[in-house]
Image (cartoon, rainbow, N blue to C red):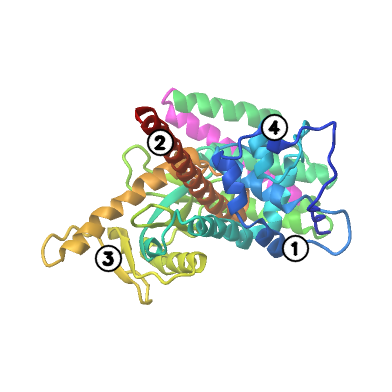
Amino acid sequence: MTPHKEQQEVQYDAFKNELKAIIDLRHPLAKLSKCIDWELFEKKFEETYAEKGRPGIATRLMVGLHYLKYTHDLSDEEVVEKWVENPYWQYFCGMRFFEHEMPIDSSSMTRWRKRIGESGAELMLKETVKTGLRTKIIKKTELERVNVDTTVQTKEIRFPTDARLYQRMREVLVKAAQKENIELRQSYVNVGKKSFFRQQNYSRASQYNRAKKETRKLKTYLRRVVRDVERKMEKENDDMFKLLKFAERLLKQERKSKNKIYSIHEPQVECIAKGKVTKRYEFGSKAGLVTSAKSNWILGAMAFHGNPYDGHTLKESLEQSEKITERAIIQATCDKGYRGNNYDGDAKIIITDGRKKRITRAVKKWMRRRNAIEPVIGHAKSEYRLERNKLKGQLGDHLNVMMSSCGFNIKKLLRAFWFVILEQITMLFNIKYCFKLI
């Protein structure tokens, strides 16, 4: 059921502290709360609720918590805990009185993200850009020239090894069989654990032949459990059938196989080589970012699965950016990875391929300016939760990259409001100093 709409005039509570009496309304977060169009979220997200049932949690509260989570690089549990301590956060989320209890359980944020989906996260990113335009922090002309680049959004998984994959797959199959009341001939819990520990120790000691022997044992244990489950599975069970197919695929894969499995709980993870010295391979999904060429606002963010060529992601990235900004892109600057792209729109595509002759001074300027997207990616990874994505599945990949971009834009908006406050304080100081001289 849709959340209850808050009444405009709430009766005063003498036993609670009103937030307006506690906080400084000139604070950037208080100013930003008045600039965001909260009613837009309520109208758009009403469609995701059922007609009957328990009323949902206030939309403004959930949107505000997600903005704060990604702006300050917090988990679901941490943002709910700190919300109780911070009156500015409560005011930003639409509270009138200071609350001393947690507003929701942290698990509600996970369910709410699944409810809004990709379109909801895209709407949240769009509103950060709209807020910048509404407050005249962003100029419309800045949205016409953009920089485009891709990076790897790594997933929260361990480094994949054959031994660990066999061990983990066997554990998952044994648990699923016990849940379905299938009596296995042997679960290999103890011998499998000992064999896995030996394999790890032999690898650390560079005794690779012994380590390979223990890996073959773990593979044998998994194969025996698979055959045992196939024999004793009486009725057709879709979940168990999928697990068995997954285990067979893991047993058949080799070093040069395509579409390999790198994680049991995140099978969509891909191995991406970006040519870095420190990290030869990264495990996750490719993410494409579009930023304004002049002021570095993130105007588009997408996750791509299947490890596509960078040039083949350009069309989708620019289309999403035009949808978010509602303005046509005149020029997009990319690196060499976008040569041979599939873009067929009206925007001019500039590839920074090292040319020094036969190009104008203006084009050289925008080619140099393309490098400004690199620190944006670095900040998004180190400060806004793009580096180790902990959200589950492909939907989690799409949500995380867009929410990370929301956090980046919100931080830029808050910084812009701080500069306005400092300018006002400086002007007041200068006026008082002039009066003293008179």
Q: Which of marks 3 and 2 is in front?
A: 2
Drawn side of residue 58 relative to residue 132, left or right? right
Pointer 1 residue: 46
Say which label, 3 or 1, has the lower sequence index.
1
Say which label, 4 or 3, has the lower sequence index.
4
* SS under mark 4: helix
Pointer 2 residue: 431
Residue at the image point whose x is 45% and y is 40% from the top: 424
* SS under mark 1: helix
Q: Nearer the viewer, mark 4 or mark 3?
A: 4
Type of amino acid under label 3? Ile
Residues 51 and 21: in front is 21
Pointer 3 residue: 350
Give me the disc on residue 81.
4
Q: Nearer the viewer, mark 2 or mark 4?
A: 2
Magenta range is: 205-229
Residues 36 and 109: in front is 36
* SS under mark 2: helix
Say which label, 2 or 1, has the lower sequence index.
1
Say which label, 1 or 4, has the lower sequence index.
1
* Residue 400 % position (x, y): 56, 50
Whole-angstrom CA distance, mark 3 to mark 1, is 42 Å
Q: Which quadrant holds residue 351? A: bottom left
* Residue 183 % position (x, y): 83, 42
Whole-angstrom CA distance, mark 1 to mark 4, is 27 Å
Say which label, 3 or 2, has the lower sequence index.
3
* Residue 364 % position (x, y): 19, 59
Q: In this view, does 153 lie above or below 101?
A: below
